Image (cartoon, grey):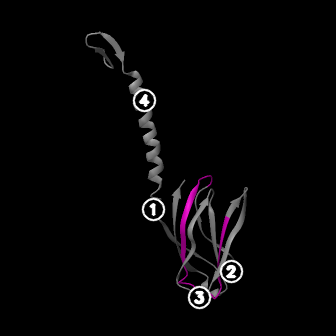
Amino acid sequence: MPGEFYVEGGKTKASLTAIESAIAGLEARLEAIKSQTDKLSGESPFEGSTVADWQTTESNLVMAGAPGARYKLHDFSIAVHNLSGSQVTVRLYKKINGAERKVYEQSFDAAADPPGLPVVNGTWAIHDPLRVTVKSNDPADNGKSVDYDFMLEAM
């Protein structure tokens, strides 16, 4: 019969079921390891731009992540080359114990600082969307685009 063999001389019937089961268990473990190591390469970079009235109110630039999803955020950079405000404020908001809280704020001078700004230069763990906002003190910045770029790695 398939999956069975006889030992010559003793004519004892032996089953390969235990071996087949062990191989199936190893294959499942290998697939679980592969799915975890595949995540290490990260997702494709998220790039884009947003046009808003930056001076009128604090405006949303982008949401990074997804509800209930866990990510490592590697580097979040923005470009303020289209803006002219002397005080361009970037804020990051994330949920803490179910309520969205401001977790970061920094102001830049669009004329004096570099046109590309690393807002997060390292790794942050996020488990819900990270909301990024921008506000400028110059009315001429209304209707201008702000570029962004970030990398996520699924956890």
Quick one: label 1, few (<14), some, or many (20+) residues within 10 Å? few
Mark 4 or mark 3: name the one nearer the start of the chain. Answer: 4
Q: Is residue 70 left or right of residue 2?
A: right
Amino acid identity at mark 3: Ser
Q: Earlier in the sequence, mark 1 or mark 4?
A: 4
Tell me, yes or no, whether the two marked residues, 2 and 3, touch with CB atoms within 8 Å.
Answer: no
Residue type (three-letter) at the residue carrying disc 4: Ala
**Residue 136 x/y as whole percent:** 65, 82
CA–CA distance in space, label 2 to label 4: 65 Å
Which residue matches tag 2?
Answer: 56
**Considering the numbered disc 4 on the image, is that residue within a helix, a strand or a loop?**
helix
Q: Is residue 42 left or right of residue 108?
A: left
Residue 22 is marked as 4
Q: Nearer the viewer, mark 1 or mark 4?
A: 4
In this view, which residue lies farthest toward the front?
A: 9
Q: Which residue is mark 3?
A: 84
Front in this rendered view, residue 25 or 77: 25
Indicate which label's residue lies in the foreground, 4 or 3.
Answer: 4
Which range of residues does the magenta coloring cover? 67-93
| Three-letter amino acid code at the position of disc 2 | Thr
Name the amino acid, label 1.
Ser
Residue under numbered circle 1: 44
Q: Tell me whether the residue at label 1 lies in contact with that at label 4, contact meaning CB atoms closer than 8 angstroms.
A: no
Q: Earlier in the sequence, mark 2 or mark 1?
A: 1
Q: Residue at x 58, y 86 (%)?
A: 110
